[in-house]
Image (cartoon, rainbow, N blue to C red):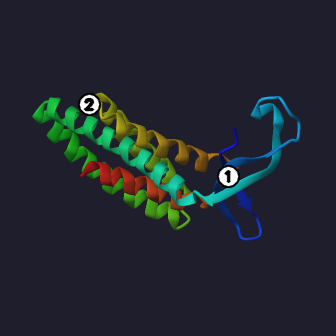
């Protein structure tokens, strides 16, 4: 049955999620001798429409938060199982790589598209090192950033339009490194 509908309001530029509830209003026929269902027919249909936009947004937010918590738990477990010397070296390298990535991204944002190639190499290094230590969340996010940089490097890339996305991805890598 139809219960939830996503409605797009182009004039307002909004999307709403509408919950629909249908109720049949029966009317009795004058036929005699038959049971009540046989004597009744649908006379009207009542429809209640309610806005479920906030409920859907909260449900999606809860799902994202639960997924992030699960990944953070995995990260903590991996940290606890790592060799302390290797972990310290990884964290030291990660700090330097993130600093270099920030500098290369700042250069690329100022129009120096050539700074994207060394940025790609640094992010690739972060991804590889994170993979070795089985930090799947950090590795996955570095891979996403690597893919975005690769798109920027293509001849028909976004040409600077993707810089805000790259900055967001770098900030996420920095949050994960804390």
User: Please, is residue 130 above or below residue 45 in the view?
Assistant: above
Residue situated in front as seen by the camera: 61 or 160: 61
Q: Which residue in the structure is indicated by mark 1?
A: 6
In the rendered structure, the answer to whether residue 3 lies left or right of residue 124 reads: right
Residue 68 placed where, x, y %?
A: 36, 44
Instruction: Name the residue rendered at 86%, 41% in the picture.
Output: 29
Q: Within 10 angstroms of label 1, few (less than 14), some, or many (20 or more) residues?
A: few
For residue 159, say whether it is visible.
no
Name the residue beneath numbered marker 2.
133
Dot label at residue 166:
none
Figure quadrant of residue 160: bottom right
Viewer-proximal residue among 73 and 42: 42
Q: Residue at x 66, y 50 (%)?
A: 21
Under tag 2, what secondary structure? loop
x, y percent for residue 43: 83, 48
Total labels drawn: 2
Image coordinates of residue 53 in percent, x first then y, are 57, 58
Mark 2 to mark 1 CA distance (whole Å): 42 Å
Residue 130 lies in quadrant: top left
Toward the viewer: 44 or 156?
Answer: 44
Which quadrant, please, contains the N terminus?
top right
Q: Secondary structure at mark 1?
A: strand
Q: Are marks 2 and 1 in contact (CB under 8 Å)?
A: no
Of residues 163 and 15, the one nearer the viewer is: 15
């Amino acid at each position: 049955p139809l219960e939830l509908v996503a409605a797009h309001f182009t004039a307002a530029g909004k999307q709403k999620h509408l919950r629909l509830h249908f109720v049949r209003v029966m009317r009795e026929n004058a036929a005699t001798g038959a049971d009540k269902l046989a004597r009744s027919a649908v006379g009207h249909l009542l429809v209640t429409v309610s806005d479920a936009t906030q409920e859907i947004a909260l449900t999606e937010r809860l799902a994202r938060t639960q997924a992030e918590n699960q990944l953070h738990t995995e990260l903590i477990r991996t940290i606890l199982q790592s060799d302390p010397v290797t972990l310290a070296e990884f964290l030291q390298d990660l700090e330097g790589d993130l600093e270099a990535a920030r500098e290369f991204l700042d250069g690329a944002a100022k129009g120096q598209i050539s700074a994207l190639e060394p940025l790609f190499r640094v992010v690739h290094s972060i991804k590889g090192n994170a993979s070795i230590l089985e930090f799947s969340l950090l590795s996955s996010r570095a891979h996403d950033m690597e893919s975005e940089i690769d798109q920027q490097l293509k001849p028909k890339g976004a040409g600077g339009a993707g810089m805000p996305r790259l900055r967001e991805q770098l900030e996420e890598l920095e949050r994960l490194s804390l």
